[in-house]
């Protein structure tokens, strides 16, 4: 179906050119908003990539506008190398050759200060990973992740307080084995006396939620609330407010106004992993209000 839609888009573009209608525009796919997004009034498809066309990625690291994904990375980190990301059969595979802090391709270029970032949205991706892993299999840190990060902090414009929402990550047990544990997190990072303090939701780990094959991982962010979804079913919610305690609260986030920094943020989307643990991504979509 993905390849069929791609062929239709190409046919439409060629027809426009032949008709003298100017440069072809990318066809907006006819995809209904997921129930959680539609219920929240987020029916506009603000971003999508089915990875039918590898040219959506800025492979040369130019930082020029017009791409959906960028390989340059912030904070002085090296850009991705050849082979760290591949696109074949309408699937992007994230397989870095060295540790990249789970920062692979992202929707925003720090180098060019261009791309896509979002405030309040429903984020989702179809992801597949190898479940037969242990910590001993990994040469360096890093594992599959679909997440978002503060645009301002990425660009070095807000070093005092910034946010992060992790839509999908995996983690190991204490003995180093992997028991399909899914992590869904929100972080409120702040500098206090020159040290970074990371405030996170404690109820963020779910056992046996990562399964074989393709599954859809989603996250709905609305003012004052973040909810995570697996195959369309809600698995966790975290509420917050500027003048109150987050709910649920824990020892790591019992701070008035915790997470409310998010309401001032634009968040870029990131796909990443670590060496020895490739992550396959079939598609990514972001829905917002009209």
Image (spheres, rainbow, N blue to C red):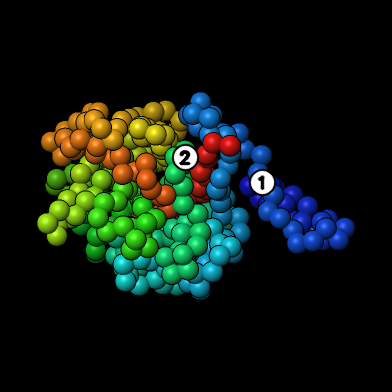
Task: Count neighbours of disc 1 (C-alpha within 10 A) and say few if under 14, some if 14 to 19, many if 20 or more.
Answer: few
How far is the residue under mark 2 from the one under mark 1?
Answer: 18 Å
**Residue drawn at the location 28% of the way across and 40% of the way down:** 259
Q: Residues within 10 Å of mark 2 (few under 14, many from 20)?
A: many
Residue 171 or residue 19, whichever sits in front: 19
Residue positioned 50% across, 32% down in the render: 37
Left or right of 257? Residue 50 is right
Question: With 90 as the anchor, is 236 left or right in this view?
Answer: left
Q: Are marks 2 and 1 in contact (CB under 8 Å)?
A: no
Residue 187 percent across, percent down from the top left: 27, 45
**Height in image: 7 above or below 64?**
above
The residue lying furthest to the top in this view is 39
Work out whether residue 2 can be spotted.
yes
Point out the image quarter for the N terminus.
Answer: top right
Label 2: element kind: strand
Q: Which residue is mark 1?
A: 28
Which image quadrant for residue 236? top left
Viewport quadrant of the C terminus:
top right
- The residue located at (15%, 39%) in the rendering is 252
Q: Residue furthest right?
A: 19
Question: Is disc 1 placed on a helix, strand or loop?
Answer: loop
Spot occupied by residue 212 in the image (x, y as percentages of width and height): 40, 41
Quarter of the image for residue 173 reads: top left
Mark 2 or 1 closer to N-term? 1
Residue 96 seen in this snapshot: no
Q: Nearer the viewer, residue 207 or 110?
A: 110
Per the rendering, the mark at residue 121 is: 2
- Residue at 24%, 60% in the rendered image: 141
Residue 247 x/y as whole percent = 25, 28
So how many labels did they put on this image? 2
Q: Looking at the picture, tell me which residue is in the foreground, 11 or 46.
A: 46
């Amino acid at each position: 179906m993905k390849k069929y839609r791609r062929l239709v888009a190409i046919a439409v573009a060629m027809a426009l050119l032949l008709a003298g209608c100017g440069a072809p525009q990318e066809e907006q796919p006819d995809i209904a908003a997921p129930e959680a997004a539609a219920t929240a009034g987020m029916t506009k498809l603000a971003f999508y990539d089915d990875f039918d066309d590898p040219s959506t990625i800025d492979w040369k690291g130019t930082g020029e506008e017009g791409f959906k994904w960028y390989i340059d990375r912030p904070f002085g980190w090296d850009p991705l190398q050849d082979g760290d990301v591949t696109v074949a059969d309408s699937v992007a595979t994230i397989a870095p050759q060295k540790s990249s802090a789970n920062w692979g391709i992202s929707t925003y270029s720090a180098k060019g200060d261009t791309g896509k970032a979002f405030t309040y949205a429903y984020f989702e991706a179809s992801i597949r990973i190898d479940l037969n892993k242990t910590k001993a299999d990994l040469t360096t840190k890093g594992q599959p992740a679909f997440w978002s990060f503060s645009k301002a902090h990425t660009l070095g414009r807000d070093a005092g307080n910034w946010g992060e929402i992790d839509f999908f990550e995996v983690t190991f047990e204490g003995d180093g084995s992997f028991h399909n544990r899914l992590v869904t997190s929100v972080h409120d990072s702040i500098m206090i006396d020159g040290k970074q303090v990371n405030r996170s939701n404690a109820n963020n780990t779910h056992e046996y939620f990562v399964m074989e094959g393709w599954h859809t991982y989603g996250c709905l962010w609305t003012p004052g609330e973040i909810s995570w979804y697996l195959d369309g079913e809600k698995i966790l919610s975290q509420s917050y407010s500027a003048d109150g305690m987050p709910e649920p609260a824990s020892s790591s986030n019992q701070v008035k106004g915790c997470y409310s920094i998010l309401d001032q943020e634009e968040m870029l989307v990131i796909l990443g992993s670590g060496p020895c643990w490739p992550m396959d991504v079939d598609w990514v979509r972001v829905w917002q209000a009209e």
